[in-house]
Amino acid sequence: MASTPRSTRAQSAGRVAVESRASRRQDAVTVAIGLWLIGGLFSDGWAHHNVPELEGFFTLWHGVLYFGLLLAGTWFAWLGRGGGRRWYRRVPAGYGWGVVGIGVFAAGGLADMAWHLAFGVEAGIDALLSPSHLVLFTGGLLILTSAVRSRWGAGDIASPVAMGALALVTALVSFFLLYVSEFTAHAPTIAVRALPEGHPEHTASELPATAGLGGFLITTALLVMPLVWTWQRGRAPRGLLTMLVALTSWLAAAVVDFDRAAVFGAAGATLGAIVGEFALDWLENRRLPRRLRVPVLAAAAIVPTWTAHMASLAVGVGLAWPVELWSGAVILSGLAAAALGGLAVSALPPPVNDAAARLQGPVRVADGQG
């Protein structure tokens, strides 16, 4: 009998350890480490793109990236301090998968070293698709989403820490989609040859425009989905759209060494996102119907972004697409954004009818369903 209180206290302590949650300041440190990781990743991408003589695994850029892994591992171990060898069981809520991510990232680093030694250094799209790099991507995603899970678990979606964490995750995904990103392709500045249907080279002549339209749609999805996830949880946090667009567009411009089209494209998109923030604020005050709110907000976020992007490219570089193509790309992206918002809304549970719930409550319990 005397052991029962001790057992109860041990179980309670275990529950407290499992349910512990990181403070906003601790999550801010995690975001800062994530920023280092993202900086190392994009600097390595810049090296792969701009340093053709790059050879081997042991480079300055890899050093920056893997030092970020060391920082993350040390910080996560500190958060789990007091747990001894099983510190990973003491990390705050939301960080468990991040611990797994550190292991995956470390394994990916070893695999990447072996891959470079065996096959050399990639210089093109293959660098984003090599198996070792995709393992690194998986590990990085698990690490960077730790602060997102922590903040959202605390009911915090609007603080700078929560928004910064989500923006870093988006930046990571954007890096591995650079080969289909509008922020590196700036497709509307590339002329399209008009060859009639049936011409042997008709399909090939339209490939740049086809790829460009695909880039607009994929980049739209990349920017809209984080917004949709936050809108499902409450009012759209101010600044998130601008943060997402600015971070992804300017980091992409850095990879291509800030060429003229990339700079004007990023500047225009960022300005358009700022305009979009005002549109979102205005719409949020209109009390839109529940089923229309997220689709309308999604379209209102993306249409100004791409409109200003197009205008900036026109001023700084010149548009080579016909008016039907560039205007259609903006409208199609807006429709795609609305469709993504609509799909997200359709997945939400219907609002609870209080009266019906009170009537059906006893029946559900009696049937063993409550």
Image (cartoon, rainbow, N blue to C red):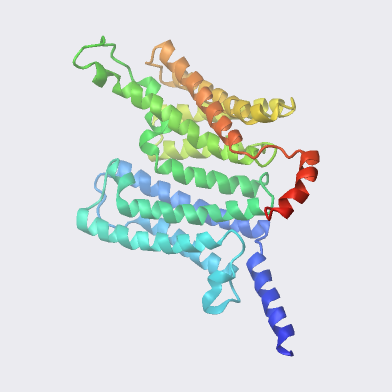
* Residue projecting furthest to the top: 196
Q: Position of residue 124 (x, y in %)?
A: 28, 41
Residue at position x 45%, y 28% from top?
217
* Residue projecting furthest to the left: 200
In the picture, measured across the screen, residue 166 lies left or right of residue 103, that is: right
Q: Position of residue 257 (x, y in %)?
A: 38, 37
281 up-or-down from 157: above or below: above
Image quadrant assignment for residue 81? bottom right
Image quadrant assignment for residue 231? top right
Residue at position x 50%, y 64% from top?
99
Q: Nearer the viewer, residue 28 or 288?
A: 288
Q: How many marks?
A: 0
Residue at position x 24%, y 21% from top?
204
119 up-or-down from 82: above or below: above
Q: Quadrant of the N terminus?
A: bottom right
Visible in this render: residue 256?
Answer: no
Residue at position x 52%, y 47% from top?
168
* Residue projecting furthest to the bottom: 2
Q: Nearer the viewer, residue 163 or 214?
A: 214
Q: Nearer the viewer, residue 170 or 272?
A: 170
In the picture, measured across the screen, residue 182 lies left or right of residue 124, that is: right
In the picture, measured across the screen, residue 324 lies left or right of residue 195, that is: right
Q: Position of residue 343 (x, y in %)?
A: 55, 33
In the picture, measured across the screen, residue 162 lies left or right of residue 205, that is: right
Visible in this render: residue 366?
Answer: yes
Q: Position of residue 301 (x, y in %)?
A: 59, 28
